[in-house]
Structure formats: C-alpha cells, structure tokens
Image (cartoon, helix red, strand yellow):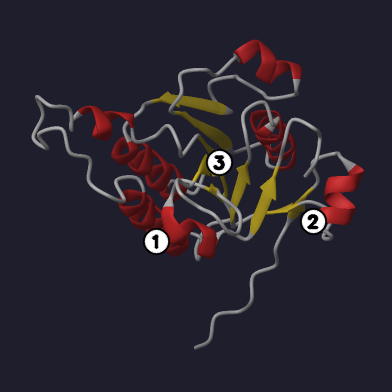
C-alpha cells in the first residue's frame, strides 16, 4: 500500500523579504533540515530564535530543543524575541560533544512531541573530539581528516530517516571557513562535509551587512 503525500506546514519568520521573496512559500518548511550559515555577527542565532518562537506558537503542545555547543545561550535575549522558556515548552542542552548532540537530536525527534530542534553550532561541535587528539591523547597530536564531517554525515542520515515520520524542523547553525591555498574560485567553505549540503532543504547565508 502506497504512503500518501504529507502536507507540509510553512512557518513564517515574520520578515516579509525572507518569507515571501527568498523562501517563496511564505516561511520555513516543517519536517525538514535547514541551515543558517555565515561569518560571525551575521545574526544567525537571531533568526533561529525567531524560528523557535514562531514554531512554538504554531504548535503550543510541543517542546522546542536547543543544543548549545558554544555555551553562549542567552535566555534574556531569547525571551526578548518571543521564545517561551518554560520547562514544558523549551529544553536547553549544553554540550560540546558532537556524538552527544546527535543523540539528543535523534531522541527528541523520536519522542514525536518535539516541534523544532536547533544545533548551535556545527563548527563548534567537535571540541571534545579535537581535544582528545592532543599530544597526550590517543592520536599523538594528529587530527583525523574529516573529524567533523563523518559524525555529521551519520547524524544527517539518522535525521533524514526520522523526518519520514515526524514534522520536526531541524535547524543547523554553521560558520564559514577559508580554504588554504585557493587561487581560483571562492575560498569559502563550511564545516560538516557534503552530506549536510545535500540534505538540507533551505540554506540561508547571513552576513553582518544584512545580506541574506
């Protein structure tokens, strides 16, 4: 028996230019992976907070999960932008371990009571792995190539499978890095490997100059 197509809900961010011009559908789609990336001070966290507030309003009986890998979550700033921080509506998880962050995301989605998950940020989520590869660690001072991309690929696969059954919106906040020795083309790159670039439905680049 074939599975019927699922109707997708679109949640407006409240910014007319973003909702109607860039996104075209009137907002961010539920049941999908989304990436906000760009240099520092690009208002990526601000846009994610706005998304959380809007999704909470649309699904008042469900919880939002914020995975903070940078230990910089500001509850006052979040409330100022409309986020409901009551225990039954919001869960904050502070960890720099990418494996632990992945487990939180997958378990939250599996509960079927989670409307949105935000991971802030991918670029900083490999701290514990990198620290284990110091001169005194098992790696003898050598960092494995693709140290962030490999676990992110596993996470993306797990989320893609879960999204077939739930309507959770998953937002990844990412940063930009410069490629070394690039002469032609853009020197800009993003942590996380190719899997994230392939599976996200919406990708927005934000910069300090208000360019999206």
Residue 180 drawn at (x, y percent): 45, 45
**Which percent across, then down, holds residue 50?**
73, 33
Could you say whether the residue bearing mark 2 is in a helix, strand or loop?
A: loop
Tell me where residue 38 sits by quadrant.
top right
Asked if labels 1 and 2 touch by Cβ distance under 8 angstroms, the answer is: no
The crowding category of the residue bearing disc 1, from other C-alpha atoms within 10 Å (few below 14, some 14 to 19, many at least 20), is: some
Q: Which x, y percent locates residue 16?
A: 91, 44
Which residue in the structure is indicated by mark 1? 157
Q: Which residue is mark 2?
A: 23
* CB contact under 8 Å: marks 3 and 1: no
Compare marks 2 and 3 and give the one earlier in the sequence. Answer: 2
Q: On the picture, is 145 further left or further right than 208?
A: left
- Mark 3, residues whose alpha carbon is within 10 Å: few (<14), some, or many (≥20)? some
Instruction: Give the residue displayed 18% in from the left and 33% down from the top.
Output: 133
Label 2, label 3: how far apart the Cα atoms are: 22 Å
- Residue 56 at x, y = what percent? 68, 35
Q: CA distance from mark 2 to mark 1?
A: 24 Å
> Which residue matches tag 3?
176
Query: Taking 199 as reference, is 158 left or right?
Result: left
**Residue 117 vs residue 113, the one in the foreground:** 117
On the rendered structure, is 75 left or right of 165? right
Looking at marks 3 and 1 on the same chain, the residue that comes earlier in the sequence is marked by: 1
Q: Secondary structure at mark 1?
A: helix
Of badges 2 and 3, nearer the viewer stands 3
Q: Earlier in the sequence, mark 2 or mark 1?
A: 2
Look at 72% across and 36% down and name the residue there. Answer: 207
Task: Report the residue at 42% width, 55% height from top.
Answer: 193
Q: Residue at x 85, y 39 (%)?
A: 14
- In the displayed structure, 127 sits above or below 174; it is above
* Depth check, front residue: 176 or 84: 176
Considering only vertical position in the picture, is 102 above or below 50?
Answer: below
């Amino acid at each position: 028996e074939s599975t019927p197509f699922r109707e997708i809900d679109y949640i407006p961010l409240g910014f007319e230019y973003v909702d109607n011009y860039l996104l075209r559908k009137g907002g961010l789609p539920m049941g999908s992976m989304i990436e906000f990336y760009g240099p520092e001070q690009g208002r990526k966290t601000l846009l994610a907070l706005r998304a959380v507030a809007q999704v909470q309003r649309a699904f008042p009986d469900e919880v939002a999960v914020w995975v903070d890998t940078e230990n910089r979550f500001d509850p006052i700033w979040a409330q100022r932008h409309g986020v409901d921080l009551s225990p039954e509506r919001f869960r904050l998880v502070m960890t720099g371990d990418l494996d632990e962050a992945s487990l939180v995301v997958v378990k939250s989605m599996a509960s079927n009571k989670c409307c949105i998950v935000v991971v802030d940020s991918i670029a900083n989520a490999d701290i514990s792995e990198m620290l284990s590869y110091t001169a005194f660690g098992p790696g003898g001072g050598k960092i494995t190539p693709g140290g962030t991309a490999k676990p992110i690929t596993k996470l993306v696969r797990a989320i893609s499978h879960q999204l077939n059954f739930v309507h959770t919106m998953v937002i990844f906040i990412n940063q930009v890095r410069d490629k070394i020795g690039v002469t032609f083309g853009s020197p800009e790159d993003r942590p996380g490997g190719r899997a994230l670039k392939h599976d996200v439905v919406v990708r927005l680049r934000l910069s300090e100059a208000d360019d999206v």
